[in-house]
Amino acid sequence: MAREIEKAEASPDRVGEWLKLRNTLGDELLAGLLGIRPARLRAYAFGHATTPEVVTARLRELTDIAYNLSGAFNNFGMQRWFARPRKAFSGESPASLLGAMWDPEGPAIDRVRNLAASPNSPTS
């Protein structure tokens, strides 16, 4: 039972856990980064549907990235960070590099996470 409680507490199905990232990135960008439609995002965020594990894992990765970026950017800046082409990605944006069906444990998210965590990420 304790394991189930921990799992439920860690679930992004709760409104508050979705709200911060929705406010930071906006529904359109967030849905695109998660590989889902905005209507589906809202259904998950309001608890009207159970969030699939892959979406949960992607959401957690994006939350960590947004946290790393929050020291250097406001919400608008973070949105642009995901959309702007990057030298580190041969001119691709972080959003393009990830694509819609990215693996939360794959190399693309590792590259995006590393860029977001690097001290010079605002200019890379």
Image: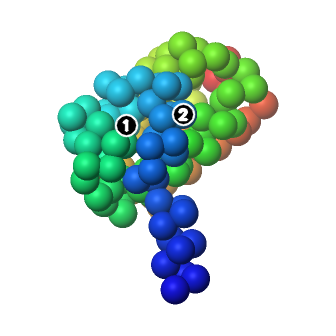
Tag 1: residue type? Leu
Q: Nearer the viewer, residue 21 or 90?
A: 21
Q: Nearer the viewer, residue 100 or 67?
A: 67
Query: Is 64 positioned to the left or the right of 41 in the image?
Result: right
Look at the image and tell me whether residue 70 can be seen.
yes
* Disc 1 versus disc 2: nearer the observer: 2
The picture quadrant where one finds residue 69 is top right
Residue 31 is situated, as x and y percent measured from the top left of the image, at 32, 35
Q: Which is more N-terminal, label 2 or label 1?
A: 2
For image coordinates 45% across by 50% down, the residue present is 14
For image coordinates 44% across by 43% down, the residue present is 15
Mark 1 sits on what residue? Answer: 33
Residue situated furthest right in the rendering: 119
Tag 2: residue type? Lys
Distance of label 1 from label 2 (alpha carbons):
15 Å
Helix, strand or loop at disc 2? helix
